[in-house]
Amino acid sequence: MGMLAHLRAIAAKDLRVERRSREVVATMAFFAALLVIVMAIGFDHERRFARTATPGLLWAAIAFAGTIGLGRAFDREREGDTMRALLLSPASRLGIFLGKAATIAILVFGVAAVCAPLTGLLLSVDLFVHPGYLAATLALGAIGVAVVGTVFAASLLKVRARDVLLPIVLYPLLIPLFVAGNRATGALLADPAQLDVARYWLGFLAVYDAVFLVVSLWLFESVVIE
């Protein structure tokens, strides 16, 4: 089996388990939806202000929901003490990393797909004027969160205070991603929409994801061995 086959096997296993239990995705979706509702209640719904506030609210929900998902990414391996067995299996380390990252990216994108219409509904803003651009922005953001976060989640697997440490070490690296996602979403909500600006920030997100994918692939094996 090649690395891509290992990737598919790991991701399919995690998604199959998650589909049965719905532990992680339900927690992520509930927390993100609750955050959106609580923050939206306190906002002035005047049209111009709502357009300005919507991107920040949406990406804040994605940030916190993504952290919850990453915090649980390796829980089953830790609780069952199966991480060593997984590393000793024929699966390549890179296949394990990419499979875990793909699972997190799918879950984060799914939560974002729920939060986007909820945010638009509560703030009376149409987020789907340019659905293709919005979907691309959310997908690239989800990939970035998953790629960067999976390395840190693996490195903190056996640390007792991992739930506290993970956001501390993760968010500084994710700030450029959240800024770019916020700016791209804001450009799509402008009147008229600033598609050139949105494309610029989409390009930034693509480069960010590519750079951190290379760095993560390089670091992951040494991280899990330690």
Image: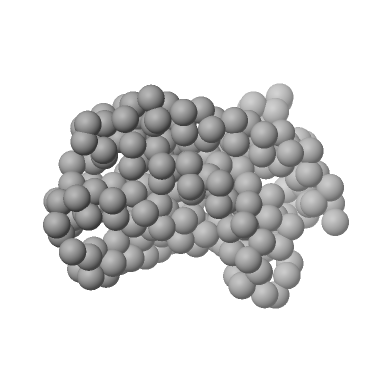
One can see residue 213 in this view: yes
Q: Quadrant of residue 210?
A: top right
x and y, in percent, of residue 208 in the image: 60, 36
> From the viewer's perspective, is residue 62 above or below residue 221?
below
> From the viewer's perspective, is residue 130 above or below residue 101?
above
One can see residue 109 in this view: no
x and y, in percent, of residue 74 in the image: 62, 57
Residue positioned 15% across, 59% down in the render: 45
Residue positioned 64% across, 26% down in the render: 4
x and y, in percent, of residue 33 in the image: 30, 60
Q: From the viewer's perspective, is 223 left or right of 154?
A: right
Query: Can you name the residue that lies furthest to the bottom here?
Result: 160
Quadrant of the image containing the N terminus: top right
Q: From the viewer's perspective, is 1 left or right of 101?
A: right
x and y, in percent, of residue 51 in the image: 24, 48
Q: From the viewer's perspective, is 220 left or right of 58?
A: right
Residue positioned 62% across, 57% down in the render: 172
Image coloring type:
one colour
> From the viewer's perspective, is residue 125 above or below residue 69?
above
